[in-house]
Image (spheres, coloured by chain):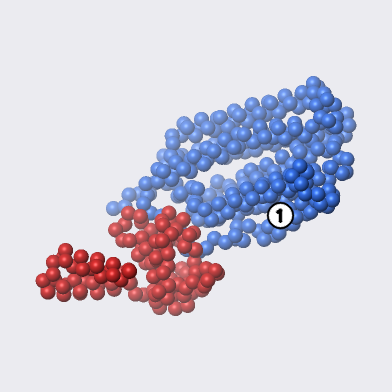
Amino acid sequence: MEWYSLLFYLLFVGQILLISYWLPRRMSARVASIFENYPPAEYPKLYPRSLDYYQLGHSLFVGCNRAILLLGFGILLALLTVVDHATFADDGFISEAWPAGYGMIQALPFVLLECIAFSQFRLMRATQSDSTRKAELRPRRFFDAASPRLVVAAVAAFLLSVGVDLWIHDFVLSWDHDTTQRAFWLVVGNLFMVSIGLWQLYGRKQDPYQSFSDRARQTRAQWTSLLSVSIVMSFFMLSTAVDDVADIDFLDAPLMSLYFQIIVLLSIGLLLRTLRPEEIDFEVYRERPAET
Amino acid sequence: MEITIDLESPDPLFAQLIEQIKAAVQSGAIESGDALPSIRQLARDLEINNKTVAKAYRLLERDSVIQTRGYRGTFVHPEAKANSTIDLVAVVEEKLHAVVAELRELGATDSEIRVAFGEVLNRRGR
Protein backbone atom coordinates (compact mmCIF):
# COMPACT_ATOMS: atom_id res chain seq x y z
CA MET A 1 0.00 0.00 0.00
CA GLU A 2 1.25 3.49 -0.92
CA TRP A 3 1.98 5.95 1.91
CA TYR A 4 -0.76 8.36 0.75
CA SER A 5 -3.34 5.55 0.77
CA LEU A 6 -2.31 4.65 4.30
CA LEU A 7 -2.54 8.33 5.23
CA PHE A 8 -6.06 8.47 3.80
CA TYR A 9 -7.21 5.35 5.68
CA LEU A 10 -5.84 6.73 8.94
CA LEU A 11 -7.55 10.07 8.36
CA PHE A 12 -10.78 8.36 7.32
CA VAL A 13 -10.81 6.33 10.55
CA GLY A 14 -10.27 9.64 12.35
CA GLN A 15 -13.21 11.16 10.45
CA ILE A 16 -15.50 8.25 11.33
CA LEU A 17 -14.58 8.30 15.01
CA LEU A 18 -14.47 12.07 15.45
CA ILE A 19 -17.75 13.00 13.76
CA SER A 20 -19.86 9.91 14.43
CA TYR A 21 -18.53 8.75 17.79
CA TRP A 22 -16.58 11.28 19.84
CA LEU A 23 -18.61 14.46 19.17
CA PRO A 24 -22.06 12.76 19.38
CA ARG A 25 -20.93 11.11 22.61
CA ARG A 26 -19.99 14.48 24.11
CA MET A 27 -23.23 16.05 22.91
CA SER A 28 -25.28 13.16 24.19
CA ALA A 29 -23.59 13.38 27.61
CA ARG A 30 -24.33 17.09 27.72
CA VAL A 31 -28.00 16.63 26.85
CA ALA A 32 -28.32 13.87 29.48
CA SER A 33 -26.70 16.11 32.11
CA ILE A 34 -29.16 18.91 31.28
CA PHE A 35 -32.12 16.52 31.66
CA GLU A 36 -30.71 15.42 35.01
CA ASN A 37 -29.58 18.75 36.48
CA TYR A 38 -32.32 20.98 35.08
CA PRO A 39 -35.51 18.89 35.21
CA PRO A 40 -38.85 20.12 33.81
CA ALA A 41 -40.36 20.38 37.30
CA GLU A 42 -37.87 23.09 38.27
CA TYR A 43 -37.14 24.61 34.86
CA PRO A 44 -40.47 24.43 33.01
CA LYS A 45 -39.61 27.20 30.52
CA LEU A 46 -36.84 25.03 29.10
CA TYR A 47 -39.32 22.32 28.12
CA PRO A 48 -42.27 23.60 26.09
CA ARG A 49 -42.93 19.95 25.18
CA SER A 50 -42.97 16.89 27.43
CA LEU A 51 -39.65 15.37 28.53
CA ASP A 52 -40.54 12.18 26.61
CA TYR A 53 -40.41 14.14 23.35
CA TYR A 54 -36.88 15.37 24.07
CA GLN A 55 -35.76 11.94 25.22
CA LEU A 56 -37.08 10.49 21.98
CA GLY A 57 -35.15 13.10 19.98
CA HIS A 58 -32.05 12.32 22.03
CA SER A 59 -32.41 8.57 21.37
CA LEU A 60 -32.93 9.27 17.66
CA PHE A 61 -29.73 11.34 17.56
CA VAL A 62 -27.75 8.60 19.31
CA GLY A 63 -29.26 5.88 17.10
CA CYS A 64 -28.57 7.78 13.87
CA ASN A 65 -24.95 8.32 14.84
CA ARG A 66 -24.49 4.65 15.70
CA ALA A 67 -25.89 3.64 12.32
CA ILE A 68 -23.63 6.15 10.54
CA LEU A 69 -20.64 4.92 12.56
CA LEU A 70 -21.29 1.36 11.33
CA LEU A 71 -21.79 2.64 7.80
CA GLY A 72 -18.41 4.39 8.02
CA PHE A 73 -16.61 1.20 8.95
CA GLY A 74 -18.54 -0.58 6.19
CA ILE A 75 -17.29 1.99 3.65
CA LEU A 76 -13.76 1.67 5.01
CA LEU A 77 -13.89 -2.11 4.62
CA ALA A 78 -15.27 -1.76 1.10
CA LEU A 79 -12.54 0.74 0.16
CA LEU A 80 -9.90 -1.67 1.45
CA THR A 81 -11.27 -4.79 -0.20
CA VAL A 82 -13.97 -4.40 -2.86
CA VAL A 83 -13.69 -0.96 -4.54
CA ASP A 84 -11.52 -0.81 -7.62
CA HIS A 85 -10.02 2.67 -7.33
CA ALA A 86 -8.50 2.52 -10.81
CA THR A 87 -11.95 2.34 -12.44
CA PHE A 88 -13.83 4.42 -9.84
CA ALA A 89 -11.72 7.58 -10.28
CA ASP A 90 -10.13 8.92 -13.48
CA ASP A 91 -6.74 9.42 -11.85
CA GLY A 92 -6.71 5.96 -10.26
CA PHE A 93 -6.31 7.30 -6.73
CA ILE A 94 -8.86 6.98 -3.94
CA SER A 95 -11.63 9.41 -4.86
CA GLU A 96 -12.32 12.39 -2.59
CA ALA A 97 -16.03 11.65 -3.16
CA TRP A 98 -15.79 8.95 -0.47
CA PRO A 99 -14.85 11.17 2.50
CA ALA A 100 -16.99 14.02 1.09
CA GLY A 101 -20.12 11.90 0.58
CA TYR A 102 -19.73 10.15 3.90
CA GLY A 103 -19.03 13.49 5.62
CA MET A 104 -22.35 14.82 4.35
CA ILE A 105 -24.15 11.77 5.74
CA GLN A 106 -22.32 12.30 9.05
CA ALA A 107 -23.61 15.88 9.17
CA LEU A 108 -27.28 14.77 8.95
CA PRO A 109 -27.88 14.10 12.69
CA PHE A 110 -26.40 17.50 13.52
CA VAL A 111 -28.66 19.17 10.96
CA LEU A 112 -31.58 17.30 12.54
CA LEU A 113 -30.50 18.62 15.95
CA GLU A 114 -30.36 22.19 14.59
CA CYS A 115 -33.89 21.82 13.18
CA ILE A 116 -35.16 20.52 16.53
CA ALA A 117 -33.45 23.43 18.33
CA PHE A 118 -34.99 25.93 15.90
CA SER A 119 -38.49 24.55 16.40
CA GLN A 120 -37.84 24.43 20.18
CA PHE A 121 -37.08 28.18 20.26
CA ARG A 122 -40.16 28.95 18.17
CA LEU A 123 -42.30 26.95 20.57
CA MET A 124 -40.69 28.66 23.57
CA ARG A 125 -41.64 32.00 22.07
CA ALA A 126 -45.17 30.83 21.27
CA THR A 127 -45.74 29.61 24.83
CA GLN A 128 -44.15 32.64 26.47
CA SER A 129 -46.88 33.88 28.80
CA ASP A 130 -44.86 36.56 30.59
CA SER A 131 -45.80 40.04 29.37
CA THR A 132 -42.53 41.66 30.42
CA ARG A 133 -39.71 42.17 27.92
CA LYS A 134 -36.11 43.03 28.69
CA ALA A 135 -33.43 44.82 26.74
CA GLU A 136 -29.86 45.80 27.31
CA LEU A 137 -29.18 49.52 27.38
CA ARG A 138 -26.00 49.36 25.33
CA PRO A 139 -25.38 48.88 21.64
CA ARG A 140 -24.20 45.55 20.24
CA ARG A 141 -21.19 46.23 18.05
CA PHE A 142 -19.59 44.01 15.46
CA PHE A 143 -16.10 44.05 16.97
CA ASP A 144 -17.46 43.19 20.43
CA ALA A 145 -18.43 39.84 18.92
CA ALA A 146 -15.82 39.27 16.23
CA SER A 147 -12.10 39.43 16.95
CA PRO A 148 -10.51 42.07 14.66
CA ARG A 149 -7.48 39.78 14.16
CA LEU A 150 -9.67 36.90 13.01
CA VAL A 151 -11.63 39.20 10.68
CA VAL A 152 -8.38 40.45 9.10
CA ALA A 153 -7.10 36.86 8.85
CA ALA A 154 -10.34 35.65 7.20
CA VAL A 155 -10.33 38.50 4.65
CA ALA A 156 -6.61 37.95 3.94
CA ALA A 157 -7.15 34.19 3.51
CA PHE A 158 -10.03 34.85 1.11
CA LEU A 159 -8.01 37.33 -0.98
CA LEU A 160 -4.98 35.03 -0.95
CA SER A 161 -7.06 32.04 -2.07
CA VAL A 162 -8.80 33.87 -4.92
CA GLY A 163 -5.65 35.80 -5.88
CA VAL A 164 -3.37 32.75 -6.05
CA ASP A 165 -6.05 30.78 -7.89
CA LEU A 166 -6.34 33.53 -10.52
CA TRP A 167 -2.57 33.87 -10.76
CA ILE A 168 -2.08 30.13 -11.26
CA HIS A 169 -4.72 30.10 -13.99
CA ASP A 170 -3.48 33.22 -15.82
CA PHE A 171 -6.35 35.39 -14.59
CA VAL A 172 -8.87 33.60 -16.82
CA LEU A 173 -12.40 34.49 -15.69
CA SER A 174 -15.13 32.54 -17.41
CA TRP A 175 -18.03 30.68 -15.87
CA ASP A 176 -16.92 27.28 -17.19
CA HIS A 177 -13.54 27.72 -15.54
CA ASP A 178 -12.74 26.11 -12.16
CA THR A 179 -11.22 29.34 -10.81
CA THR A 180 -14.44 31.31 -11.28
CA GLN A 181 -16.53 28.55 -9.77
CA ARG A 182 -14.23 28.23 -6.76
CA ALA A 183 -14.31 32.01 -6.20
CA PHE A 184 -18.11 31.97 -6.59
CA TRP A 185 -18.59 29.21 -4.00
CA LEU A 186 -16.13 30.87 -1.66
CA VAL A 187 -18.12 34.10 -1.88
CA VAL A 188 -21.45 32.27 -1.42
CA GLY A 189 -20.09 30.31 1.57
CA ASN A 190 -18.70 33.44 3.21
CA LEU A 191 -21.87 35.44 2.58
CA PHE A 192 -23.92 32.64 4.12
CA MET A 193 -21.73 32.59 7.21
CA VAL A 194 -21.69 36.38 7.53
CA SER A 195 -25.49 36.48 7.33
CA ILE A 196 -25.76 33.83 10.08
CA GLY A 197 -23.35 35.84 12.22
CA LEU A 198 -25.13 39.15 11.63
CA TRP A 199 -28.50 37.56 12.34
CA GLN A 200 -27.13 36.23 15.61
CA LEU A 201 -25.58 39.61 16.49
CA TYR A 202 -28.31 42.05 15.47
CA GLY A 203 -31.39 39.88 15.05
CA ARG A 204 -34.06 38.89 17.52
CA LYS A 205 -33.00 36.53 20.30
CA GLN A 206 -33.79 32.97 19.27
CA ASP A 207 -34.27 31.80 22.84
CA PRO A 208 -36.68 34.34 24.37
CA TYR A 209 -35.46 33.66 27.91
CA GLN A 210 -31.71 33.68 27.27
CA SER A 211 -29.78 36.15 29.44
CA PHE A 212 -27.91 38.96 27.69
CA SER A 213 -24.52 37.81 28.98
CA ASP A 214 -25.17 34.30 27.60
CA ARG A 215 -26.25 35.75 24.30
CA ALA A 216 -23.08 37.85 24.08
CA ARG A 217 -20.93 34.80 24.88
CA GLN A 218 -22.76 32.67 22.32
CA THR A 219 -22.42 35.36 19.65
CA ARG A 220 -18.68 35.71 20.32
CA ALA A 221 -18.21 31.93 20.14
CA GLN A 222 -20.24 31.76 16.94
CA TRP A 223 -18.21 34.50 15.24
CA THR A 224 -14.94 32.86 16.27
CA SER A 225 -16.22 29.62 14.81
CA LEU A 226 -17.52 31.20 11.57
CA LEU A 227 -14.34 33.17 10.94
CA SER A 228 -12.14 30.13 11.63
CA VAL A 229 -14.25 28.01 9.27
CA SER A 230 -13.96 30.75 6.63
CA ILE A 231 -10.14 30.70 6.90
CA VAL A 232 -10.03 26.90 6.59
CA MET A 233 -12.44 27.03 3.65
CA SER A 234 -10.19 29.54 1.86
CA PHE A 235 -7.11 27.37 2.39
CA PHE A 236 -8.97 24.28 1.22
CA MET A 237 -9.99 26.08 -1.98
CA LEU A 238 -6.38 27.19 -2.36
CA SER A 239 -5.23 23.58 -2.04
CA THR A 240 -7.63 22.50 -4.80
CA ALA A 241 -6.34 25.34 -7.00
CA VAL A 242 -2.72 24.27 -6.41
CA ASP A 243 -3.81 20.70 -7.15
CA ASP A 244 -4.53 21.76 -10.77
CA VAL A 245 -0.88 22.53 -11.45
CA ALA A 246 1.16 20.68 -8.82
CA ASP A 247 0.10 17.12 -9.67
CA ILE A 248 -0.93 16.17 -6.14
CA ASP A 249 -4.12 14.30 -7.04
CA PHE A 250 -3.12 11.51 -4.66
CA LEU A 251 -3.71 13.95 -1.77
CA ASP A 252 -7.29 14.84 -2.77
CA ALA A 253 -8.98 12.22 -0.58
CA PRO A 254 -6.76 12.71 2.52
CA LEU A 255 -7.18 16.50 2.26
CA MET A 256 -10.96 16.20 1.93
CA SER A 257 -11.17 13.98 5.02
CA LEU A 258 -8.92 16.33 6.98
CA TYR A 259 -10.98 19.31 5.81
CA PHE A 260 -14.22 17.77 7.10
CA GLN A 261 -12.66 17.03 10.47
CA ILE A 262 -11.24 20.52 10.91
CA ILE A 263 -14.54 22.13 9.89
CA VAL A 264 -16.49 20.03 12.39
CA LEU A 265 -13.96 20.70 15.16
CA LEU A 266 -14.07 24.44 14.49
CA SER A 267 -17.84 24.57 14.41
CA ILE A 268 -19.49 22.01 16.68
CA GLY A 269 -16.35 21.22 18.68
CA LEU A 270 -15.51 24.84 19.40
CA LEU A 271 -19.08 25.70 20.41
CA LEU A 272 -19.25 22.65 22.68
CA ARG A 273 -16.01 23.68 24.34
CA THR A 274 -16.90 27.35 24.73
CA LEU A 275 -20.54 27.14 25.80
CA ARG A 276 -20.49 24.95 28.89
CA PRO A 277 -23.78 24.29 30.76
CA GLU A 278 -22.21 25.24 34.10
CA GLU A 279 -21.60 28.75 32.75
CA ILE A 280 -25.11 29.18 31.32
CA ASP A 281 -27.71 31.03 33.38
CA PHE A 282 -30.46 28.41 33.73
CA GLU A 283 -32.32 30.48 36.34
CA VAL A 284 -34.10 32.26 33.47
CA TYR A 285 -35.96 29.00 32.74
CA ARG A 286 -37.52 28.77 36.19
CA GLU A 287 -41.17 29.73 36.64
CA ARG A 288 -41.42 33.14 38.28
CA PRO A 289 -43.69 33.25 41.32
CA ALA A 290 -46.97 35.01 40.56
CA GLU A 291 -46.94 38.67 41.54
CA THR A 292 -49.41 39.61 44.25
CA MET B 1 -27.77 47.63 32.42
CA GLU B 2 -31.12 46.11 31.54
CA ILE B 3 -34.51 47.73 31.20
CA THR B 4 -37.84 45.97 31.49
CA ILE B 5 -41.18 46.94 30.01
CA ASP B 6 -44.56 45.37 30.55
CA LEU B 7 -46.59 44.90 27.38
CA GLU B 8 -49.81 44.62 29.39
CA SER B 9 -49.25 47.62 31.61
CA PRO B 10 -51.83 50.45 31.29
CA ASP B 11 -48.89 52.88 30.91
CA PRO B 12 -47.99 53.50 27.27
CA LEU B 13 -44.86 51.65 26.12
CA PHE B 14 -43.02 54.82 25.12
CA ALA B 15 -43.70 56.31 28.57
CA GLN B 16 -42.34 53.15 30.24
CA LEU B 17 -39.22 53.43 28.09
CA ILE B 18 -38.71 57.11 28.95
CA GLU B 19 -39.19 56.39 32.63
CA GLN B 20 -36.74 53.47 32.60
CA ILE B 21 -34.04 55.37 30.71
CA LYS B 22 -34.39 58.37 33.02
CA ALA B 23 -34.24 56.06 36.04
CA ALA B 24 -31.06 54.48 34.63
CA VAL B 25 -29.53 57.95 34.27
CA GLN B 26 -30.63 58.94 37.76
CA SER B 27 -29.21 55.79 39.35
CA GLY B 28 -25.91 56.25 37.51
CA ALA B 29 -26.29 52.95 35.64
CA ILE B 30 -25.67 54.94 32.45
CA GLU B 31 -23.66 58.12 32.43
CA SER B 32 -23.25 61.08 30.14
CA GLY B 33 -21.49 60.11 26.93
CA ASP B 34 -22.48 56.43 27.18
CA ALA B 35 -23.71 54.93 23.92
CA LEU B 36 -27.31 53.75 23.75
CA PRO B 37 -28.66 50.99 21.52
CA SER B 38 -30.05 51.91 18.14
CA ILE B 39 -33.82 52.27 17.75
CA ARG B 40 -33.93 49.05 15.75
CA GLN B 41 -31.92 47.04 18.30
CA LEU B 42 -34.01 48.23 21.24
CA ALA B 43 -37.28 47.61 19.39
CA ARG B 44 -36.16 44.12 18.39
CA ASP B 45 -35.02 43.20 21.91
CA LEU B 46 -38.22 44.49 23.49
CA GLU B 47 -40.35 43.04 20.69
CA ILE B 48 -42.12 46.34 20.10
CA ASN B 49 -42.55 48.64 17.11
CA ASN B 50 -39.62 50.79 15.94
CA LYS B 51 -41.92 53.80 16.01
CA THR B 52 -42.55 53.39 19.74
CA VAL B 53 -38.83 53.46 20.51
CA ALA B 54 -38.33 56.34 18.06
CA LYS B 55 -41.04 58.32 19.87
CA ALA B 56 -39.41 57.69 23.26
CA TYR B 57 -35.99 58.68 21.89
CA ARG B 58 -37.46 61.82 20.29
CA LEU B 59 -39.00 62.92 23.58
CA LEU B 60 -35.81 62.11 25.50
CA GLU B 61 -33.81 64.11 22.98
CA ARG B 62 -36.23 67.02 23.30
CA ASP B 63 -35.69 66.92 27.08
CA SER B 64 -31.88 66.78 26.57
CA VAL B 65 -31.58 63.39 28.24
CA ILE B 66 -30.05 61.83 25.14
CA GLN B 67 -28.47 63.20 22.00
CA THR B 68 -28.09 61.79 18.51
CA ARG B 69 -24.71 62.29 16.87
CA GLY B 70 -25.48 61.46 13.25
CA TYR B 71 -24.31 58.09 12.05
CA ARG B 72 -22.29 57.51 15.25
CA GLY B 73 -25.45 56.74 17.17
CA THR B 74 -27.31 57.90 20.25
CA PHE B 75 -25.58 58.89 23.48
CA VAL B 76 -26.51 60.02 26.96
CA HIS B 77 -26.59 63.84 27.05
CA PRO B 78 -23.93 65.65 29.15
CA GLU B 79 -26.74 67.28 31.20
CA ALA B 80 -28.84 64.11 31.32
CA LYS B 81 -28.83 63.72 35.09
CA ALA B 82 -30.16 67.21 35.71
CA ASN B 83 -32.74 66.79 32.96
CA SER B 84 -34.02 63.42 34.14
CA THR B 85 -35.66 64.66 37.30
CA ILE B 86 -38.84 65.97 35.69
CA ASP B 87 -41.55 63.39 35.11
CA LEU B 88 -43.07 64.68 31.88
CA VAL B 89 -46.16 62.49 32.08
CA ALA B 90 -46.88 63.80 35.57
CA VAL B 91 -46.38 67.40 34.41
CA VAL B 92 -48.74 66.96 31.45
CA GLU B 93 -51.33 65.21 33.61
CA GLU B 94 -51.18 68.00 36.19
CA LYS B 95 -51.68 70.70 33.57
CA LEU B 96 -54.50 68.82 31.88
CA HIS B 97 -56.15 68.20 35.23
CA ALA B 98 -56.28 71.96 35.84
CA VAL B 99 -57.64 72.68 32.34
CA VAL B 100 -60.31 69.98 32.58
CA ALA B 101 -61.40 71.22 36.00
CA GLU B 102 -61.72 74.78 34.61
CA LEU B 103 -63.74 73.60 31.60
CA ARG B 104 -66.09 71.59 33.82
CA GLU B 105 -66.60 74.65 35.95
CA LEU B 106 -67.58 76.53 32.79
CA GLY B 107 -70.24 73.86 32.17
CA ALA B 108 -68.60 71.74 29.48
CA THR B 109 -69.46 68.04 29.55
CA ASP B 110 -66.72 65.34 29.45
CA SER B 111 -67.90 64.37 25.98
CA GLU B 112 -67.55 67.95 24.73
CA ILE B 113 -64.09 68.23 26.29
CA ARG B 114 -63.01 64.99 24.56
CA VAL B 115 -64.25 66.19 21.18
CA ALA B 116 -62.59 69.58 21.67
CA PHE B 117 -59.30 67.94 22.67
CA GLY B 118 -59.46 65.67 19.65
CA GLU B 119 -60.01 68.62 17.32
CA VAL B 120 -57.17 70.61 18.85
CA LEU B 121 -54.79 67.67 18.60
CA ASN B 122 -55.85 66.95 15.03
CA ARG B 123 -55.39 70.58 14.04
CA ARG B 124 -51.91 70.51 15.65
CA GLY B 125 -51.03 67.39 13.68
CA ARG B 126 -51.93 68.89 10.28
The residue at which mark 1 appears reads as: A154
Residue A18 shown left or right of residue A288 in the figure? right
| Number of disc labels | 1
Q: Position of residue A10 (x, y in %)?
A: 79, 34
Q: Residue furthest top?
A: A82
Q: Residue at x 58, y 47 (%)?
A: A276
Q: Is residue B51 above or below residue A188?
A: below
Q: Position of residue A130 (x, y in %)?
A: 37, 49
The three-letter code of the residue at mark 1 reads Ala
Q: Position of residue B60 (x, y in %)?
A: 41, 71
Q: Residue at x 52, y 72 (%)?
A: B69
Q: Residue at x 83, y 48 (%)?
A: A169
- For the C terminus of chain B, the quadrant is bottom left
Chain letter for the blue colouring in the rendering: A
Chain letter for the red colouring in the rendering: B
Q: Secondary structure at mark 1?
A: helix
